[in-house]
Amino acid sequence: MTENLTILFDLDGTVIDSTEAILEGFHNSFDVYDLPQPSDEDIKALIGHPLDVMYANLKIEKNLVWDMVKTYKEHYSKIYKDKTILLEHAVESIRLAQEIARLGVVTTKTGTFSRDLLEHFGVMDAFEVLIGREHVDKPKPDAEPINKAMEMMKADKSNTWMIGDTRLDIGSAINAGIKSVAVTSGYDTREQLQSLTDIIETDVLEAVKYISKF
């Protein structure tokens, strides 16, 4: 293990693919409230943001947003394990990272769902800390989630990296003053990621290999 090296992982689009479960959760909530359905593409373009922000961006009235979030979570909780998969090389990347660094998760996903999924896939043991949406006031791209993870891990800021698939992840790393590697396995395109970084790899395994060189 490289001394003092810490790697923080995003989840959706970086380690796991829960697109099917997310889309079903959103479409179900629109059905429950008998509202016109957004397109899959409109929903996917917002993945990575907190649920309330996603609903607001899908033009849900402010007084209905939290009811929709509650409905989403109720349905999602019934399907998320069956309709989430690990991305290719995810386990290999986590085990490789474990050999060279201390690991944490920093996600905008609900922490309870995140922990349960990682336990379901048999990799939660690799992570010392998991910061989910309910653990912070200001989610990514604010620095708070990363700062909280580093504080809990007593991590060396100068030797901490964030791996993520969206500008929210990279922006959070920039705001927290740490290094990052973007991956194209998720929801932002290479062109979108290039607006914030030129360190871009195809997937999380390649990202871990990149970090291992330092």
Image (tube, rainbow, N blue to C red):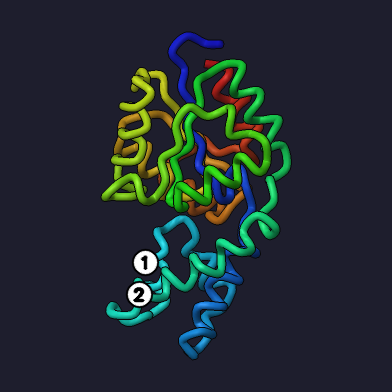
Q: State the residue in front, 199 or 152.
A: 152
Give, as a three-letter code, the residue at label 2: Val
- Position of residue 165 relative to residue 31, above or below, is above
Tag 2 near tag 1, CB within 8 Å: yes
Q: Which residue corresponds to the image point at 34% horizontal and 20% vertical from the top-left?
A: 154
Q: Residues within 10 Å of mark 2 (few under 14, many from 20)?
A: some
Left or right of 152 on screen, residue 75: right
Q: State the residue in front, 67 or 181.
A: 67
Which type of secondary structure does the marked residue at label 2 adopt?
helix
Whether residue 195 is visible to the viewer of this picture, yes or no, is no
Distance from the alpha carbon under mark 2 to that under mark 1: 6 Å
Q: Which residue corresponds to the image point at 56% horizontal and 61% vertical from the top-left?
A: 77
Q: Residues within 10 Å of mark 1 (few under 14, many from 20)?
A: some
Give, as a three-letter code, the residue at label 1: Asp
The quadrant in which the N terminus is found is top right
- In x, y percent, where is residue 167? 43, 49
Nearer the N terminus, badge 2 or badge 1?
Answer: 1
Q: State the residue in front, 111 or 85.
A: 111
- In x, y percent, where is residue 108? 43, 51
Q: Which residue corresponds to the image point at 49% horizontal and 60% vertical from the top-left?
A: 47
- In x, y percent, where is residue 54? 41, 67
Q: Which residue corresponds to the image point at 56% horizontal and 56% vertical from the top-left?
A: 187
- Position of residue 100 relative to residue 145, above or below, is above
According to the picture, the residue beneath numbered tag 2 turns out to be 65
Which type of secondary structure does the marked residue at label 1 adopt?
helix
Quarter of the image for residue 201 reads top right
Left or right of 68 on screen, residue 212: right
Whether residue 93 is visible to the viewer of this picture, yes or no, is yes
Q: Number of labelled discs? A: 2
According to the picture, the residue beneath numbered tag 1 turns out to be 52
- In x, y percent, where is residue 150? 35, 27
